[in-house]
Image (cartoon, rainbow, N blue to C red):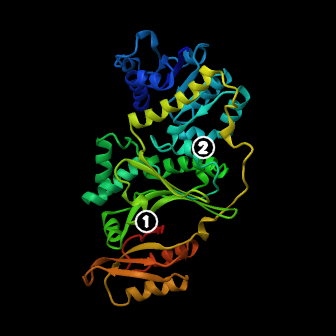
């Protein structure tokens, strides 16, 4: 059985993990599968970094990705540079040259899915992408295989390790958002520029991929309602905990008949929910299907080795096809024949309960003013808490509401924030039961 030759483009955090894994566990892979993986070429702009990998010979180094794309002996190209360009050009050229591709690039897939998989289908090659969502969690494989017999009704995803780590630090240690972010950056968990993570954008890109596989729907991440965690405070986390909730950044897809509700935002979830115990950098995806019921996939959602494990698993999956010269269509999972027609729930018509934290001057009549505005917008209060009276000073006034329409909530909060005794912008967090 011949070796399967691999070209790796990008030797950063994940790429380095791939190199380490193939070096350390290559024999294990061979013993279990009979497949020998060989890194024929590794491309990175920083050739000095390549020299730090003792398992690589200088002949395997290159700073020119064309050496990989033009090498007829390379069977599989791993793209790990991230972003849309120039990654897209590299992937399309690899596919056009008849090479299979493995990628962890959620930005590229969520942006250019059809073009990539049309090219793969035309050239009869695979594109595998398990590591694009959830790191070491096999959610992609489950959606393509294990759950393929089900109509999915609900997906909740904690899909970003950076935000989950920050919220965990705020919860367990009482850190402010800024303090927790600095700790995440010092540990290499958060990027120097963490905007994509903390804004919810990274989770929206991953949700877009889940939607294609789980619901047969192509949606741009830009069209998914998205809010980040920047405005969450330890105070909110503590109040939520007092009422039996934890706060998580959730990627949400809910199906009702032919309508889909899509959103990414911080949410209060009950402390008994399966997702409530997902802490630190870990990710998890909660799936509800019509036949499987509830299912939870949990594990490391980021990091060099967990993500590399998913990448190399994808490589092994393709390698089995390469060595056996299989005739199976390599693009059966792209859902080109299963595009479903859904209407999308308008954001302003979401009908869900809310957590509200007002900052108000403690004076007689303040609660009456706020309650009147809420009632006028068909919003009813379920529970309420106010800090010990400090007359003349600003204090938190916290409420949980019954189900309310998002558009009504926006109108109410806009009006409330203009009251002269309201000293700061109201914090609004949605609740998922």
Distance from the alpha carbon under mark 1 to that under mark 2: 29 Å
At which x and y percent is residue 27?
Answer: 42, 21
**Residue 168 seen in the current view:** yes
**Which residue in the protein does label 2 denote?**
145
Dividing the picture into quarters, in which one does residue 427 lie? bottom left
Dividing the picture into quarters, in which one does residue 4 lie? top right
Q: Residue at x 39, y 60 (%)?
A: 276
**Residue 81 seen in the current view:** no
Would residue 417 appear left or right of 187 to someone viewing this image?
A: right
Question: Quadrant of the image for the N terminus?
Answer: top right
Would residue 19 appear left or right of 405 to someone viewing this image?
A: left
Q: Earlier in the sequence, mark 1 or mark 2?
A: 2
User: Front-most of 182 and 249?
Assistant: 249
User: Front-most of 323 and 368?
Assistant: 323
**Which residue in the protein does label 1 denote?**
269
Q: Which mark is residue 376?
A: none
Q: Residues within 10 Å of mark 2 (few under 14, many from 20)?
A: few
At which x and y percent is residue 68?
Answer: 55, 17
At which x and y percent is residue 252?
Answer: 54, 58
Q: Which element carries disc 2, helix, strand or loop?
A: helix
Q: Residue at x 30, y 58 (%)?
A: 170
In the current view of this chain or complex, which residue is farthest to the top? 59
Q: Which element carries disc 1, helix, strand or loop?
A: strand
Q: Residue at x 66, y 48 (%)?
A: 218
Would residue 294 appear left or right of 275 to someone viewing this image?
A: right
């Amino acid at each position: 059985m011949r070796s399967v030759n691999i070209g790796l483009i990008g030797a950063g955090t994940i790429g380095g993990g791939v190199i380490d894994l193939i070096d350390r566990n290559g024999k294990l892979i061979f013993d279990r599968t009979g497949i020998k993986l060989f890194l024929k070429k590794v491309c990175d702009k920083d050739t000095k970094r390549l020299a730090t990998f003792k398992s690589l010979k200088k002949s395997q180094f290159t700073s020119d990705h064309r050496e990989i794309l033009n090498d007829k002996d390379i069977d599989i190209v791993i793209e790990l540079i991230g972003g849309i360009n120039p990654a897209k050009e590299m992937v399309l050229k690899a596919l056009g040259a008849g090479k299979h591709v493995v990628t962890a690039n959620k930005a590229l897939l969520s942006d250019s899915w059809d073009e990539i998989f049309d090219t793969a289908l035309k050239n009869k090659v695979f594109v595998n992408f398990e590591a694009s969502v959830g790191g070491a969690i096999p959610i992609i494989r489950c959606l393509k295989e294990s759950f393929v017999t089900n109509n999915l009704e609900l997906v909740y995803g904690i899909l970003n390790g950076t935000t989950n780590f920050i919220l965990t630090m705020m919860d367990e240690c009482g850190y402010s958002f800024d303090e927790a972010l600095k700790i995440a950056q010092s540990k290499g968990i958060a990027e120097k520029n963490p905007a994509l993570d903390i804004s919810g954008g990274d989770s929206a890109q991953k949700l877009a991929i889940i939607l294609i596989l789980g619901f047969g729907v192509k949606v741009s991440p830009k069209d998914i309602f998205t809010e980040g965690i920047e405005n969450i405070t330890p105070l909110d986390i503590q109040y939520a905990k007092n009422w039996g909730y934890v706060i998580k950044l959730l990627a949400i897809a809910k199906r009702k008949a032919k309508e889909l509700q899509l959103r990414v935002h911080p949410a209060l979830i009950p402390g008994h929910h399966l997702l409530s115990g997902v802490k630190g950098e870990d990710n998890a995806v909660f799936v509800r299907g019509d036949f499987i019921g509830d299912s939870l996939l949990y594990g490391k959602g980021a990091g060099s080795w967990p993500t590399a494990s998913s990448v190399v698993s994808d490589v092994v999956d393709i390698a089995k096809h390469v060595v056996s010269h299989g005739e199976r269509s390599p693009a059966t999972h792209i859902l080109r024949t299963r595009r479903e027609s859904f209407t999308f729930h308008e954001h302003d018509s979401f009908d869900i309960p809310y957590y509200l934290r007002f900052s108000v001057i403690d004076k007689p009549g303040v609660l009456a003013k706020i309650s009147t505005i809420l009632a006028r917008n068909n919003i009813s209060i379920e529970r309420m808490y106010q800090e010990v009276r400090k007359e003349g000073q600003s204090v938190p006034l916290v409420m949980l509401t019954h189900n309310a329409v998002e558009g009504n909530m926006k109108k109410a909060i806009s009006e409330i924030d203009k009251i002269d005794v309201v000293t700061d912008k109201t914090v609004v967090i949605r609740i998922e039961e």
